[in-house]
Image: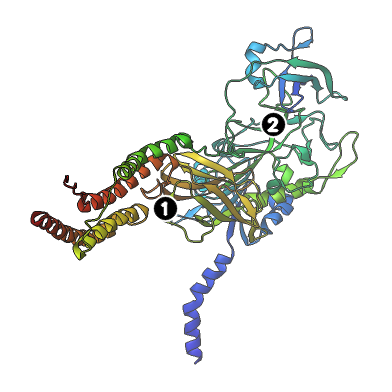
């Protein structure tokens, strides 16, 4: 009996192990260029480890066992690259393979620093973010911390400079301490996001050279944290300062000239941004798309023009690991045949969104389309195709007043024929009386 | 100094444009704003701009951002319609249904209805005037059959107009039509015979 039990366990062991690995749904690779980062940035690494369901692998940039794919399948779901000085990574990981990783849906968190090599620059420019050159730094003569070492590059960014999206950065953030490179994004790029900008007096330049022409970044265009949400909803976050993630900055106070000292908001902000980047926050999905005639339940095979139609779908949001009804009030639905004929807001009742409208009097093959994209949320879309028929020959309006002459003529003709046939066939001529004398 | 910037802030939208002031040989910092060249930077936002001078350097102890003046800038209006961005709510579209064709007033239809009824009414009136009868009606099965059949055909036409389709109508019509034809044929033969013998 014991022998039988042992054999059964051996059979089920692979299944058991697969189930355990499925429980860890986020596999995070952290790449360091300096092993000391594990100590200086221990709080940041703990933030990564405390993401629910995350299994974290920490490797050095020159570790020969570094690999993204094995047998053609991705080994990790997310990468944290804390290797600004690395010119290249071992294991065949180049800027191109890392960008390919993002194309396949992986999320990326990259930190640059005052000394940044070409690897991080290439990755950044692939996602639409331009880092300033090595030797430059973000300088703000009016918003620097008291602990600055003379260059005024330990800048303080107010929470007012954060992107206006609570799903990305949370709320009630304190001022952020930052020392590193400045970045810019192209304003024509709709996918790039400026998450934390410098103040109006900030600029990015080499502190030892005079400014000739124009600095790389000036004022509010100087990005301290930039991001990108790709079309496949993979998220990339780039910060120009590895130091802002350090324990020293997390635990320090912000002391500005003429203002009371406040705790730095780095830890809270980076915690929220990590959750956003690794798809724990700001993730929505569409379920249960349905359409039918108003007042009915079944989905018809086609609609006829001018019918009242109701389109509904269910949207959920991932909050703290569970899918809850999505509360957005600005979801729009389109009824499209090449171009949209109807576009209207959907009414949200606890995650069930509905829209009621009249089918246009144009026939053809239409699509119900929902394409919802908002800053900080994943982009979701759904479409259902349905034909719209014109009126059948017996669905038109009848007994129109203008037709009464025709009815009158046909009816009078039928009546006339009947009466005339009676009279004509059975009429009796009166015989004229013979004249009598 | 390291930083000598001039910042223009649009009062309505808080959009900022920053220019660098460069020193000449006498350490006098100046900057030129050629509106012909720089109009594109402003994005056609006309209005009052507050002009600030930002002076800063690592070695000076009092960096300043000094609101120097308010400048009213008028820019030519932009022709391009601002397309909604990827993340913005798009404008609503309501379909405008085609107006139905206009119809003549009811009076016109009624007048013509009466005109169409006029012939049969005039015929009845004339008949009354000249005196008309159906005294020769034989009351035989064939005569009754024919006239009732003829009436039934017209009633069938009426129902076809109201609700029947061609299939059922042809079915009924073939039945009634056959009866009416046979009756009518016999009835006419009888009449012809009566006329010949009279």
* The C terminus of chain A: image quadrant: top left
Point 75% across, 37% down: residue? A161
The picture quadrant where one finds residue B44 is top right
The residue labelled by disc 2 is A222
The picture quadrant where one finds residue B171 is bottom left
Residue B165 in sight in this render = no
Q: Are marks 2 and 1 in contact (CB under 8 Å)?
A: no
The residue labelled by disc 1 is A302
- Mark closer to the observer (2, 1): 1
**In the picture shown, does residue A339 fall above or below A310?**
above
In this view, the residue farthest toward the top is B26
Task: Name the secondary structure under disc 1.
Answer: loop
**In the picture shown, does residue A329 fall above or below B11?**
below
Task: Name the secondary structure under disc 2.
Answer: loop
Q: Earlier in the sequence, mark 2 or mark 1?
A: 2
Badge 2: few (under 14), some or many (20 or more) residues near its Cα, within 10 Å? many
- Which chain does the residue under circle 1 lie in? A
**How far across and down, in percent of the image, does residue A22 sit?**
55, 65
**How far across and down, in percent of the image, does residue A216 sit?**
66, 26
- Which chain does the residue under circle 2 lie in? A
The picture quadrant where one finds residue B15 is top right
**How far across and down, in percent of the image, does residue A374 sit?**
62, 44
Badge 1: few (under 14), some or many (20 or more) residues near its Cα, within 10 Å? few
Disc 2 to disc 1, how far (Cα)?
A: 54 Å
């Amino acid at each position: 009996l014991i022998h039988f039990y042992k054999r059964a366990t051996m059979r089920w062991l692979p299944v058991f192990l697969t189930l355990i690995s499925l429980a860890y749904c986020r596999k995070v690779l952290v790449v360091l260029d300096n092993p000391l980062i594990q100590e200086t940035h221990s709080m940041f690494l703990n933030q990564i480890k405390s993401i629910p369901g995350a299994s974290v692998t920490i490797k050095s940039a020159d570790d020969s066992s570094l690999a993204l794919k094995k047998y053609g399948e991705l080994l990790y779901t997310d990468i944290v690259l804390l290797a600004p000085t690395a010119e290249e990574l071992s294991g065949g990981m180049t800027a191109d393979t890392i960008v390919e990783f993002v194309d396949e849906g992986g999320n990326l968190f990259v930190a640059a620093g005052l000394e940044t090599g070409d690897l991080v620059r290439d990755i950044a420019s692939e996602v639409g973010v331009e880092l300033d050159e090595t030797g430059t730094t973000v300088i703000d003569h009016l918003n620097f911390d008291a602990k600055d070492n003379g260059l005024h590059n330990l800048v303080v960014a107010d929470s007012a400079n954060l992107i206006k999206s609570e799903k990305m950065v949370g709320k009630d953030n304190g001022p952020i301490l930052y020392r590193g490179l400045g970045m810019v994004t192209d304003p024509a790029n709709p996918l790039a996001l400026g998450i934390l900008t410098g103040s109006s007096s900030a600029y990015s330049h080499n502190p030892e050279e005079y400014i000739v022409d124009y600095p790389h970044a000036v004022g509010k265009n100087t990005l301290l944290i930039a991001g990108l949400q790709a079309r496949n909803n993979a998220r990339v976050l780039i910060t120009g300062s590895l130091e802002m993630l350090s324990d020293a900055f997390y635990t320090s106070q912000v002391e500005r000239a003429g203002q009371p000292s406040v705790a730095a908001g780095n830890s809270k902000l980076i915690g929220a941004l990590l959750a956003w980047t690794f798809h724990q926050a700001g993730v929505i999905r569409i379920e249960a798309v349905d359409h039918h005639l108003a007042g009915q339940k079944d989905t018809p095979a086609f609609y006829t023009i001018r019918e009242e139609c109701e389109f509904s779908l269910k949207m959920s949001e991932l909050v703290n690991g569970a899918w809850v009804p999505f509360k957005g009030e600005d979801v729009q639905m389109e009824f499209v045949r090449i171009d949209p004929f109807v576009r209207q807001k959907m009414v949200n009742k606890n995650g069930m969104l509905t829209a009621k409208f009249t089918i246009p009097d144009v026939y053809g093959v239409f699509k119900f389309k929902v394409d919802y994209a908002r800053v900080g949320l994943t982009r979701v879309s759904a479409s259902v195709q349905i034909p719209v028929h014109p009126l059948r020959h017996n669905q038109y309006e009848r007994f129109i007043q203008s037709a009464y002459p025709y009815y009158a003529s046909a009816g009078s003709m039928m009546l006339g024929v009947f009466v005339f046939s009676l009279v004509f066939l059975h009429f009796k001529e009166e015989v004229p009386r013979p004249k009598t004398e | 100094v390291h930083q000598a910037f001039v910042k223009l802030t649009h009062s309505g939208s808080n959009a900022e444009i920053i220019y660098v002031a460069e020193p000449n040989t006498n350490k006098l910092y100046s900057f030129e704003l050629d509106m012909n060249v720089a109009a594109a930077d402003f994005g056609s936002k006309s209005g009052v701009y507050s002009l600030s001078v930002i002076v800063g350097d690592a070695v000076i102890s009092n960096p300043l951002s000094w609101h120097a003046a308010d400048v009213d800038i008028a820019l030519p209006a932009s022709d391009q319609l601002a397309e909604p961005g990827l993340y913005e709510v798009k404008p609503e579209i309501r379909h405008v249904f085609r107006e139905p064709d206009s119809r003549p007033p009811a009076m016109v239809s009624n007048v013509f209805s009466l005109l169409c009824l006029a012939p049969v009414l005039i015929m009845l009136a004339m008949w009354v005037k000249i005196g008309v009868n159906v005294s020769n009606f034989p009351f035989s099965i064939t005569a009754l059959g024919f006239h009732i059949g003829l009436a039934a055909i017209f009633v069938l036409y009426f129902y076809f107009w109201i609700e029947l389709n061609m299939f059922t109508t042809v079915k009924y019509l073939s039945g009634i039509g056959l009866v009416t034809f046979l009756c009518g044929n016999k009835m006419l033969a009888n009449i012809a015979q009566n006329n010949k013998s009279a």
